[in-house]
Amino acid sequence: MSLRFGTKLALIFMALFLGGQAALYLVIYQTTNRNVEGQIADQLRASGRVLQRVLSERDAQFTQSVSLLSRDFGFRQAIATGDQPTVLSALANLEARSSLDTAVVVDLDGELLAHVGNVEQAYAGALLPESLREQTLDAGAISAIEQVGNRLFTVVIAPVLAPAPVGWIAFGTELDERAAAEIQRLSPIELDIAFVSSRVGAGWQLAAATDHEAELRALVAEGTLRASADQDGEVVRGDVAGEEHLIWRQSVGQLAGGGEVDVLLFYSLNVALGPYRDLAITLLGIAGAGFLALILGSVAVSRSVTKPLRRLASVADRIARGDYEDMPPAPASRDEVATLSRSFASMVGAVREREDRILHQALHDPETGLPNRIGFERHLDSLVRKGKPFAVLVAGVADVSELRSTLNHQYTTELMADIGQRIKHVGNCQVTRLSTESFALCVSDPDRAGDVAASVINAFSVPLPVADVQVDVTIRIGYVRFPKDGEDTATLLRRASVALDLARHDPTRSAAFDPEKDSTAKERLSLMSALRHGIEHGEVTFAYQPKYDLRAGRVTAVEALVRWISPERGFIPPDDFIPMAEKTGDIRHLTRWGINEAAAQCAAWRKKGCMLTVSVNLSASDLMNPDLPAEALRAQKEYDLPTGALHFEVTESAIMQDMDRALEVLSGLFSMGFPMSIDDYGTGYSSLSYLKRLPVGELKIDKSFVLKLAQSEEDQILVRSTVDLAHNLGLKVTAEGVEDEASVDLLKRYGCDVIQGYHIARPMPADEALDFIMRSRVSAE
């Protein structure tokens, strides 16, 4: 999901605020917890020290009391005489005046003489075990901790001497809930206290606790609480009754019979942190109010930022649609958005200026400044929508390739501009540069189309001056009428081109569109589709015409001549499909097939011992294909042919259409070792200036000069001089169209190198050509 910028901005502010608040609360929480825990730990330790002091003071008090009583004469006399009532009276009197829980007197044999307090008679004697009685004989009064059942007592024991021992007396205070509560009251915090004990060989058990006795008893029995406070003097965390507590353990002392007594001081963290909850709620309230203020502020800030940005986005959408009108003024403020708006307005102006320039360039010809085909098509579209009749004239400039080769680029450009201006002046209407060789104009009155065409053609009877040279320009015009010859722009332009083709063959050099001729053009186009199908399915083949070497006295090469026999159309002459293939670009498919087919046949003949050179004809379009040398080399390598096995022939006219590009391709073929010939020499320019620039090794004299060589002295002069010229330039000469033996004799006399024609052999399929060549060699031998 895509979020708007204002929403993103508000979310970022809120995320930063919440992150900061969360970090602040975390710091406060951790700091508060540490401080509270530290304070509780200090209070627990202080309470432990209070407990220790209370127990010590109590022991000292009871020691003093028991010492005084044990030295009382009447009390000793009562014990010595076994006066139990007197002893009981003394113990009861002492119990009433002190905080002791029990007092016990035993005789010399350890038998219970008297006891008072909260200890049953059966267990009273347990407070004065023999081990402690014996210690008192040497040490006097001693203190100890005794466990009677599950109850813990701190006792002070002293011997009764008269002067020999007559018995022992013990004062005891129980470590129970009352003792724990007394310590609890002395603590500055409301902590909980528990006394636990462990006899030798037995587990820990709870003796007394101020709270949670049932839960603590289970925890002590399981060892959980003891494990939580296993480090004496260390404050640790532990779970008591489902709440987390801080626990501090302190040893109270050792049991007289072996074992240990500890006190556990624990305090609930929930209780300790309770006062801070109100503070936390207050802080949360403040944070909530701040968060609400942040939301409102973020919305206000985001609107102040996004509103001008949305305005800019709206302007950008209008610009994208090509609407540059009524642009809002840039704000006068100096903030960043205003700066952006001013920069945007400046950019819009620059874009508009650049777009106008690009649009002008897109709709106008860069050489002549006239509207181009795109602009003309738009103009025609608008006229078609209006529905009013009009005529479209397409004027073609003849022999543009010759003009380009004669004049340099600058002068050719100037010439084409002058041609456009002359047509515009004569036609008295807007002229369009339709292509590199044609112009177009519209005439509002279709009936005047023929007259305007004639006027334009006649206007060029006067040469055009270019670079101090008078250039004769020939114009041909084809025209169509709307809506008679077409109801849309594309149809009108296509049919105008068809009419222009008709004008090239019309003596007046102008022609109107003829529907019958259009169907012929369509037939030619369908012919190209059939040609591609024929190449793929073997309908197109080569016929090979032998070339006889006069010096070697045998056939050394053949020329591959294309033949097409269609199952539907029958035999189709090359002149019917090759020119059209050159116009449509299908000639490249034909040439690619021809090179591979010739290479394959040449390789097959060589495997049979027939070392022939195979010549393949190239068209003007082939000479514009920069990939041709690589394709030829690929075929040569694929069939493992030696250099020179494939030979290429090209006509003069094909080279002259674009000599510079043709030279690049020919030079590429020459550098790869492919021999080349000028085919049909004498029918084109026959200029020494271009002959010496071409990387060719052979001239082929056109058959028109050879067919009647024996009867025409003029042809004999031309052929003889051509042979001499070629030899002087280091070129071989092949004569085409040799029809009789007399012509052969003349060509031998002139020094011609190779002859070709029906007198030698007609073009024939590959198998027949091989048989003919092998037979001719046998007969020659």
Image (tube, rainbow, N blue to C red):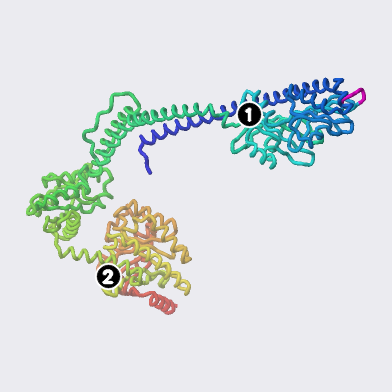
> In terms of depth relative to the viewer, which is nearer, 292 or 591?
292
Residue 706 falls within the magenta-colored stretch: no
> Which residues lie in the magenta part?
159-164
Decide if residue 598 is in sight here: yes
Q: Nearer the viewer, mark 1 or mark 2?
A: 1
Helix, strand or loop status at disc 2: loop
Q: Which mark is residue 573?
A: 2
Q: Left or right of 770: which side holds 58?
A: right
- For residue 745, what is the image quadrant? bottom left
> In terms of depth relative to the viewer, which is nearer, 488 or 339?
339
Tell me which amino acid carries mark 2.
Pro
Q: Residue 318: horizontal and vertical position, in percent? A: 25, 39
Which residue is depicted at the point 14% across and 51% down? 385
Q: Residue 700: horizontal and vertical position, in percent? A: 33, 64
Residue 162 falls within the magenta-colored stretch: yes
Packing grade of label 2 (10 A; few <14, some 14-19, many >=20) is few
Q: Quadrant of the N terminus?
A: top left
- For residue 207, what is the image quadrant? top right
Q: Residue 707: horizontal and vertical position, in percent? A: 27, 70
Which residue is depicted at the point 87% across and 23% down? 76
Which residue is depicted at the point 30% across and 59% down? 585
Q: Which residue is mark 1?
A: 191
Which residue is depicted at the point 41% across and 28% down? 289
Tell me which amino acid carries mark 1.
Leu
Q: Residue 479: horizontal and vertical position, in percent? A: 14, 55
> In terms of depth relative to the viewer, which is nearer, 161 or 274?
161
